[in-house]
Image (cartoon, rainbow, N blue to C red):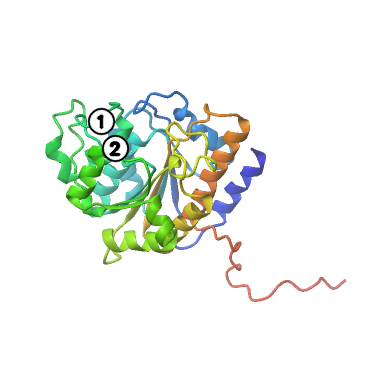
């Protein structure tokens, strides 16, 4: 993974007036699904060099309420937040904290799956397939009382959510999408319009006045398994890495992207090459989300010419 260590210098050198402060939270949590290994995602990315020389804000394992509290504290310090999972149920904590601190946010859920089931509609009973349903106010009446979840009140409107990358949606999830008119772009839409237009179409729906704080919750299974094989629920025919990078580049340029979750990386799945490929893809997505340009680094501030040769 030595080749991936370049990410540390890239992010450190990104510094501009929007992303001078970046808070990073590792969430080695896997109880929302049944496959071992996804809790190792944060550590695997650390070993790839992402975390060196950056402020580490620690791990929050097993408790989304604590994650919500920590998220609010970091946002109060005017930091942008990168959360490394862990399974996608951690989004309950990150998004809850973001809404409580910033109010009316815009959520972009990049995923092969809608994660929109309730306890009554889920065929698996796995919590990582339910976070959007738990977070949105329109679906609050479809839930029974959940012991231990009294801290979490669904305050996010489903009108402020956009899906990108869907290609495996359960029947009741499709019913909810159609019933509430949720903004949802599947791979068929991306084929038709292209990722550039889809991204702007999503923003125009969930942030029409260009005023809301943006939260991207990015499941690595939104990528095609050829790009990111180390995940628990892969679905063929997904986003290319190039499409994912461009999506994040567009969102970065809004200057309102304040939070990015990267979830469902499982280094226990596949061989060493698969792990390197998956983590490498995640790092490229993170880079794009926090300002790295594929055109290369920017001209140094205040510099107008290259250095002249030294006269001896």
Can residue 18 be spotted in the picture?
no
Q: Is residue 227 left or right of residue 112?
A: right
Asked if the residues shown at circle 1 and circle 2 are in contact, with their CB atoms under 8 angstroms apart, the answer is yes
Q: Nearer the viewer, residue 12 or 135?
A: 135
Instruction: Determine the image quadrant of residue 44.
Output: top right
Which corner quadrant holds the N terminus? Answer: top right
Image position, residue 73 (x, y; %): 32, 44
Q: Nearer the viewer, residue 62 or 118?
A: 118
* Other-residue count near label 1 (Cα within 10 Å), few / some / many at <14 / 14–19 / ≥20: some
Q: Residue at x 60, y 67 (%)?
A: 300
Image position, residue 236 (x, y; %): 47, 40
Image position, residue 241 (x, y; %): 52, 50
Q: How many marks?
A: 2
Is 224 placed above or below 38 here? below
Q: Residue at x 32, y 40 (%)?
A: 169
Tell me the tag on residue 122: 1
- Label 1, label 2: how far apart the Cα atoms are: 9 Å
Q: Is residue 72 left or right of residue 30?
A: left
Mark 1 or 2 closer to N-term? 1
Instruction: Determine the image quadrant of residue 159.
Output: bottom left
Is 182 placed above or below 112 here? below
Task: Describe the element under mark 1 as helix, strand or loop.
Answer: loop
Q: Residue at x 47, y 49 (%)?
A: 239
Which corner quadrant holds the C terminus? Answer: bottom right
Q: Is residue 193 left or right of residue 162?
A: right
Task: Describe the element under mark 2 as helix, strand or loop.
Answer: loop
Q: Which residue, given by chain and number where applicable, does mark 2 sit on?
A: 170
Outermost residue on the bottom side: it is 304
């Amino acid at each position: 993974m030595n080749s991936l260590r370049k990410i540390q210098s890239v992010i450190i050198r990104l510094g501009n007036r929007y992303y001078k402060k970046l808070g990073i939270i590792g969430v080695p949590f896997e109880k929302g699904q049944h496959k071992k290994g996804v809790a190792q995602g944060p550590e695997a990315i650390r070993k790839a060099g992402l975390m060196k020389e950056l402020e580490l804000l620690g791990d929050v394992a097993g408790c989304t309420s604590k994650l919500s509290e920590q998220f609010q504290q970091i946002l109060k310090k005017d930091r942008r937040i990168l959360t490394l999972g862990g399974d996608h149920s951690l989004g309950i904590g990150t998004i809850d904290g973001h809404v409580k601190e910033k109010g009316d946010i815009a959520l972009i859920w990049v995923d092969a799956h809608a994660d929109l089931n309730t306890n009554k509609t889920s065929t698996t009973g796995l919590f990582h397939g339910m976070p959007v349903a738990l977070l949105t106010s329109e679906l609050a009446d479809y839930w029974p009382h959940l012991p231990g979840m009294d801290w979490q009140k669904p305050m996010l409107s489903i009108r402020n959510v956009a899906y990108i990358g869907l290609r495996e949606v359960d029947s009741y999830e499709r019913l909810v999408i159609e019933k509430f008119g949720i903004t949802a772009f599947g791979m068929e839409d991306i084929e038709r319009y292209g990722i550039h237009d889809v991204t702007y179409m999503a923003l125009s729906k969930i942030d029409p006045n260009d005023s809301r704080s943006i939260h991207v919750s990015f499941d690595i299974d939104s990528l095609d398994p050829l790009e990111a094989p180390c995940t628990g629920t892969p679905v063929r025919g997904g986003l290319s890495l190039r499409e994912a990078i461009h999506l994040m580049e567009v969102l970065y340029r809004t200057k309102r992207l304040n939070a990015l979750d990267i979830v469902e990386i499982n280094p226990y799945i596949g061989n060493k090459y698969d792990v390197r490929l998956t983590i490498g893809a995640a790092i490229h997505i993170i880079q794009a989300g926090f300002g790295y340009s594929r055109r290369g680094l920017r001209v140094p501030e205040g510099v107008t010419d290259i250095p002249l040769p030294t006269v001896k």
